[in-house]
Image (cartoon, rainbow, N blue to C red):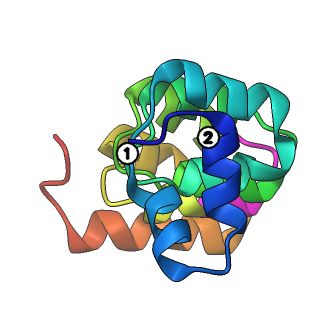
């Protein structure tokens, strides 16, 4: 378990692959994630990439000013319905595309994305629905 924000930063910036592998997979307390999100903006992408990140931290990162952070959040399978909806309405089309491609995106959200003004987003949503007719009914 990652014990502090400083440990996460040290692990993520290490040249040792085992260290940054830990940063990508090990859990931490909510307090550590919150400290990272609030005090280390340069680490937010890497926080979002972590495989054990809690929904609380994803909720904070879903409105991050950095589109790459929001895209990483949009790829997470553990999003709740509210986060799927929020990210499906993101001003950036690459975030909406990530939601359209997310295997856990609810059918209703995909239906809305089929009318997205960015054709590649709408096409990704249509393709997901057509390949999976029983998708999250």
Percent from the top left, x then y, of residue 3? 50, 34
Percent from the top left, x then y, of residue 34? 64, 23
Residue 96 visible somewhere in the drawing: no
Say which of 91 and 108 sits in front: 91
Asked where in the image residue 15 lies, by quadrant, the reply is bottom right
Q: Which residue is mark 1?
A: 52
As drawn, 126 above or below 42: below
Residue positioned 40% across, 28% down in the render = 81
Q: Which residue is mark 2?
A: 87
Q: Quadrant of the C terminus?
A: top left
Percent from the top left, x then y, of residue 27? 39, 41
Per the image, is 94 magenta?
yes
First to last magenta residue range:
90-97
Number of residue marks: 2
- Residue 82's label in the rendered image is none
Say which of 16 and 129 sits in front: 16
Residue positioned 43% across, 48% down in the render = 111
Horizontally, residue 50 falls left or right of residue 94, namely left
Q: Nearer the viewer, mark 1 or mark 2?
A: 1
As drawn, 77 above or below 124: above
Residue positioned 67% across, 71% down in the render = 14
Give the distance between the C-alpha atoms of the residues marked 1 and 2, in whole angstroms.
Answer: 20 Å
Percent from the top left, x then y, of residue 11? 61, 60
The answer to which of marks 1 and 2 sits earlier in the sequence is 1
Instruction: Examine the residues drawn in magenta and state their main secondary structure.
Output: helix
Say which of 123 and 83 sits in front: 83
Q: Residues within 10 Å of mark 2 (few under 14, many from 20)?
A: many
Residue 110 visible somewhere in the drawing: yes
Q: Secondary structure at mark 1?
A: loop
């Amino acid at each position: 378990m990652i014990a502090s924000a400083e440990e996460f930063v040290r692990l993520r910036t290490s040249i040792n692959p085992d260290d940054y592998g830990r940063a990508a997979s090990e859990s931490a307390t909510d307090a550590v994630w919150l400290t990272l999100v609030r005090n280390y903006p340069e680490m937010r992408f890497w926080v979002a990439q972590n495989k054990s990140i809690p929904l609380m931290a994803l909720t904070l990162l879903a409105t991050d000013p950095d589109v790459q952070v929001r895209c990483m959040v949009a790829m997470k399978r553990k999003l709740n319905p509210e986060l799927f909806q929020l990210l499906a309405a993101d001003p950036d089309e690459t975030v909406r595309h990530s939601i359209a491609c997310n295997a856990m995106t609810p059918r209703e959200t995909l239906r809305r994305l089929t009318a997205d003004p960015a054709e590649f987003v709408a096409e990704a949503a249509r393709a997901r629905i057509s390949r999976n007719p029983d998708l999250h009914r």
